[in-house]
Image (tube, rainbow, N blue to C red):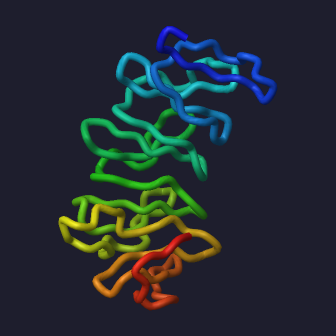
Amino acid sequence: INGKVGYIDKTGKVVINPQFDSIMPFSEGLAAVKVGGKWGFVDKAGKYVIDPQFESAHDFADGLAPVLVGGRLGYIDQRGKFVVNPQYWSGHQFSEGYAGFSSDSKTWGFIDTTGRVVVPAKFGVDTPVVSTSGVGPFSEGLAMVLTEGGWGFIDPTGKQVVSPQFGRAGG
């Protein structure tokens, strides 16, 4: 309505009036919303839990959401407190307690929900043809990783479980 968006329930009834420039789906009870060029988070009543202050924001997963501040990505908890300070070029949502990260856009690794690097950034292929993350999310204890040999799978310790050999992989 007038260029603004809000939320409806399963029956189509408006539950949060159109007032946002852009919205994300609810995840773990909160939704990222954009107003005036900044992203924040609202609860299911439409009340701001975390005021708009981020350049970008994504869904909560494992209690944390990736947000961009000053061109760097970090992770906040549901109160808006940084658990992992903004320091990465890019990063993924958490899955099974781990999130892929990149400090330089070329190599990717994994951190845990405390921000500790559990798998150093060593995955990815530096080529102008491939514009992709060098890692995928953990699913059933494995994550896909890209090397010069192709896609393979590792466990949370970084141990190779399926050797890199595939041109494409999915998690």
Question: Split into 4 quadrants, where in the image is the N terminus?
Answer: top right
- What's the residue at 55%, 68% (across, down)? 138
As drawn, which residue projects farthest toward the left? 128
In the image, residue 9 lies at what x, y percent? 75, 26
As drawn, which residue projects farthest toward the right? 11
Q: Is residue 99 above or below residue 67?
A: below
25 lies left or right of 73: right
Pick the front one: 16 or 47: 16
> How many circles with numbers are drawn on the protein?
0
Pick the front one: 100 or 2: 2
Pick the front one: 85 or 69: 69
In the image, residue 58 lies at what x, y percent? 48, 41
- What's the residue at 28%, 44% (across, down)? 72
Q: Is residue 28 above or below residue 98?
A: above
In the image, residue 121 lies at what x, y percent? 31, 70
Q: Is residue 57 above or below residue 14?
A: below
- What's the residue at 43%, 41% (across, down)? 82
The quadrant where residue 104 appears: bottom left
Q: Is residue 80 above or below residue 139?
A: above
In the image, residue 57 lies at what x, y percent? 44, 37
Question: Split into 4 quadrants, where in the image is the C terminus?
Answer: bottom right
- What's the residue at 57%, 60% (across, down)? 95
152 lies left or right of 1: left
